[in-house]
Image (cartoon, grey):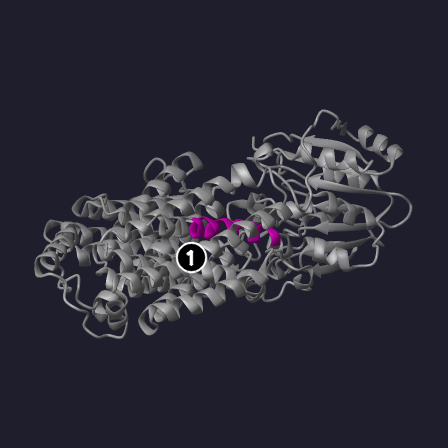
Amino acid sequence: MLLHAATIALSAFLLFLVQPIVARQILPWFGGSAAVWTTCMVFFQLALLAGYFYSDVVIRKLAPRGQAIVHTVLLLASLAFLPITVSEAMKPTDASQPVGRILLLLTLTIGLPYLMLATTGPLVQAWFTRQYRSARVYRLYALSNLASMIALLGYPPLIEPNASGRLQSVGWSVGYAAFALLAIAAAWSGVRRGAAAGELAAADAHAEGIAAPPRPAAAEAKGAAAMQAAHDAVAAPIGLARDPAAPPSTLEQGLWLLLAALGSTLLLAVTTHITQNVASIPFLWVLPLSIYLITFILCFDGTGWYWRPQYMALAAIASVAMLGGLSFRPAGFGVERAILHIEHAVPVYAFGLFVLCMFVHGELVARKPAPAHLTRFYLMVSLGGAIGGLAVGLGAPTVFDYYWELPLALTIVALLVAVLARGGLRAAGAAATIASALLFADYLHWIRGDVLELSRNFYGTLRVTGAADGDVSPGASRRLLHGVILHGEQYTAPEARAVGTTYYGPGSGVGRTIEASRSAEPMRVGVIGLGVGTLATYGREGDVYRLYELNPVVLDVANRHFTYLKDSRAKLEPALGDARLVLEREAPQRFDVIAVDAFSSDSIPVHLLTREALAVYRRHLAERGTVVFHITNRYLDLSGVVAQLAAEAGMHAVRFYDEPPTEAVQYRSDWIAVTPDAEFAKVLWAAGGEPMDASGRTRPPWTDDHHNLFEVLK
C-alpha cells in the first residue's frame, strides 16, 4: 500500500512542478504574456485527458500482465525526453499562431513524460483496487491533489528564487527517473500479488466483462451497504442510478462532464479576472489554483467535508455576489461604477471560487461510481477539465471580445443549483439564476458604455474609450486600456493632439533622455512597447523611430483611433514580434535611445530585464546611446534590478522620478536611463536625473536562467 501511495504522491508532485518550470522557459519567447500560462494550462489539461483515456483503455482491454508490460515500455521510452530543457531551435521567428506553437513546443519537450505522470492516478488506483478490494481508493486521489498543491505552493517562494532554470530541469528529471522506477514496481507488484493469491483470474475476468467468482454473501452485502450509505450521505436522489456498483449511465457521465468542465472554467476565468482586471501581482495566479486543488482534496477525502444543502445555498449567493462585484457601485445610484478594488476583490473572488468549486466538486464526488468504474469516472472528469480549459484558453479569446466567460460561468452555476436542488433550495437557485442573468446584462452594458472599440486576442483585451469621432472639444480625450492598465491617452483638440500625456511628458525620464540626446544629426530611437504611439510625438524631421510591438492589434488601434503616429514628423518603422527576439536577429541599429516600456497590464516580462537582454540592447546602441527603462509599478520596485545590471555591465544608471501637479495631463512616472558613456551620464544628471549606486546589492543580478520577483515586491 505504501508503494502505491508513494507512486501517486510523487507523480502528482512532479505533474504540477513541471508546469511552472517549463512555462518559465518558454515565457520569454512569447512576449512574457499572461496568456502563455493559460495556453500551458490547456496543454496540461489535454495531456491529462490523454493520460486518463490511456488508463481507461488499458484497464478495460488488457490483462494485468499486459498492462504492466505496456506501461513499463512507455515509462522507459519517456526517459529519452530527459532532461526537460526546451531547445533553442524551437524559438519562434514571428508572432503568428502563438497558441499552436506553444502546444507543439510542449508536446515535443515534455509530451511523453507528462502523459505518463497523468496516467498514474487512475492507473495505480485501479491496481490498488485489484490487490486490496478497498472502497477507500478515492482517498488516494485526495493524496494526489495534496501533493500537487505542495508543488504549486512551494515553487514560487522556495524553488524559483534559489535554483537556476537549468538546475530546476535537472532536479525534476532526477525526480522523474525515481518516479519511473516506483511506477514500474507498482505495475509488477500487482501481477505478482494477484498470481500468488489466486485472484488474477478474477481480475482478468472482470477486465474482459466476465462475472468474477462470487465473494462470500455476508462480506458482499456488508461492503455494498457501506458504499451505498457513503454515497447517499451527500447526494440526495435526483433521478440518477443509485446503485454504486451499476455501470454509470450516459446521464451520469454527462453530469460528471458538466461539473468538471464548470470547475475548470471557473478556475481559469477567476484567475484571468483577478490578474488582468484587478491586479497583476506576481504569483497571484497561485491563489485560485490552490483553492481549486483544496476543494478536490476535501471532496475526495471522503470524510464528509461537502455539506450539500449548505454549499448549494452558498453557491447561489456566491454566484450573485461575484457577478455584482464585476461592476460594483460604491455608494448607490448616481455614483460612477468600478471593478472592486484589490483589497475587496481578492477576498470576494477567492472565497467565492472556494464555495463554487466545493459545490461542483462535491456534487461530482457524490456521484462517483464503485471502484470498478473509476477509470471511466476519471476519464470524464479529465475530459470535462479539458473542455473547460479549451473554452477559456482557446475558445473565449476567439469568440468573445471581452472576458465574458466569468459572468457566463457564474450564471450557469446559479442555474445548476436550481436544477440539482430540491424544495426551497430550488426556489433559491431559480432566484439566483434570474439575478445573475440581470447582473450579467448590466455588466455587459457597462463595459460597452463609452467603448469605441473592444478587441481580444492571445495577448489580452484592449479597450478604446472616450471621445467619439469628430469630438474636438477642450478636454476631450481617448484612452487605450489593457486590462486595468492605461496604455496611453490623447486629447482630440487640434492644439492638444501633440502633447505627450500620461507617463511620457517632457518631464518624464524618457522625455528628458530624448531631449538630452539631441544633436545636429537626426536621431534613431527604438521603442519597445508601442501603446498609442505617444513617444512618436518627440520625432523630428529626419529622425527614425523603430517601433517594436508584440501585439499586431495594438499597432492597428494606434493608427485608427489615435493620431500620434500619423502626426509624427519622424520616419516610423514598425517591427512586429517580441522585441528581444527581433533585436537578436537584426543587424546593429545604432540607436541613440532605446525606450523599454513593454509591461503589459503591470505584468513584468522578465526577459527584458536580464543581463542577456541588456547585452542585446547595448549591441544596438550608438556610441553615446542610452537605454531607458520604464519601471513605474504599483507592486514591484525594479530600480535595484536595473541599477545592478548597469553596474555589472560597466554602465551608468541615472534615475528620473517625475511627479507632475495633479491638474497636469501627465502622471507620476519612474524611469532609469542606462548609458555606457560617463560624460553623457553627467548630461543626464544635469537634466534632472539622479545617479544610482548598486554597490550595496548582494543578490545575484537577474539573468535568463535565474531571477527572483519576491525580492522586488514592495
Q: Quadrant of residue 95?
A: bottom right
Which of the pair 125/583 is nearer the observer? 125
Tell me the kind of residue under disc 1.
Ala
Other residues around mark 1 within 10 Å, as few (<14) / some (14–19) / many (≥20): some
Pointer 1 residue: 185
When the figure is inspected, residue 702 is found, relative to residue 69, above or below; the finding is above
Q: In which quarter of the image is residue 655?
A: top right
In reply to whether residue 24 is colored magenta, the answer given is: yes
Residue 139 image position (x, y, % from top left): 29, 49
Residue 202 image position (x, y, % from top left): 23, 68
Q: Is mark 1 on a helix, strand or loop?
A: helix
Would residue 454 be seen by someone viewing this image from the given angle? no
Q: In this view, does 682 lie to the left or right of 629?
A: right
Residue at image point 56% right, 30% down = 714
Residue 1 image position (x, y, % from top left): 32, 50
Residue at image point 72% right, 60% down = 575
Report the span colored magenta. Answer: 10-25
Which of the pair 263/470 is nearer the observer? 263
The mark total stands at 1
In reply to whether residue 402 is colored magenta, the answer given is: no
